[in-house]
Amino acid sequence: MSNTITLNVNGQNHAVDAPPDSMLLYALRNDLKLHGPKFGCGLSQCGACTVIMDGSAIRSCVTPLAAVAGHKITTLEGLGSVDKPHPLQQAFIDEQAVQCGYCINGMIMTAKALLDRNPKPSRDEIKHALNGNLCRCGTHMRIVRAVERAAKQGGAA
């Protein structure tokens, strides 16, 4: 019996052979070889696995494949490339907001969803949006500055 589920990821349809109750994170990383979303806690508490589904930031470690079929998923790889980073990715580079880098996927994807719905957030709104993403390295202020920089430069593009 086939468990093929079609996922629309970064604008392309992909057929994934997996049980409908398996988590999106595993399909993204193992089947589609997209390594932006990370496995952090597996409990939807750290944000490392964050992706955007239909404009909203979601935690892929607790989202079953059955819940995303028919929806548009965007991963970090869908924003920009090494040669042409998305304005938000470029702001993180410019602010040197990355130390170990483990949380950055979640920070950028959460910030992208924020800027898409609120292109000019206040510092408090940025902090509130990023509150559920854990960073152990202590680059929080650089991360906030990166989101502010992206907002000033039209970073939701």
Image: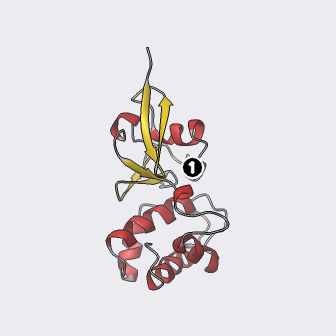
The residue tagged with tag 1: helix, strand or loop?
loop
Residue 144 x %, y %: 49, 77
Looking at this view, is 143 or 33 the one in front? 33
* Residue found 36% across the figure and 41% down from its top: 68
Task: Mark yes or no: residue 14 visible.
Answer: yes
Q: Number of numbered discs present? A: 1
**Rendered image quadrant of residue 86:** bottom right
Q: Position of residue 14 (x, y in %)?
A: 49, 38
Q: Nearer the viewer, residue 95 or 151?
A: 151
Pick the quarter of the image with the C terminus. bottom left
Q: Is residue 110 above or below residue 123?
A: above
Looking at the picture, does residue 1 appear above or below residue 126? above
Residue 45 visible? The answer is no
| Residue drawn at x 33%, y 75% as measured from the top left | 118
- Position of 130 with respect to 99 (left or right) is left
The amino acid marked with disc number 1 is: Lys
Mark 1 neighbour density, 10 Å: few (under 14) some (14–19) many (20 or more):
many
Question: Residue at coordinates 53% horizontally, 42% vertically from top-left?
Answer: 28
Residue designated by label 1: 38
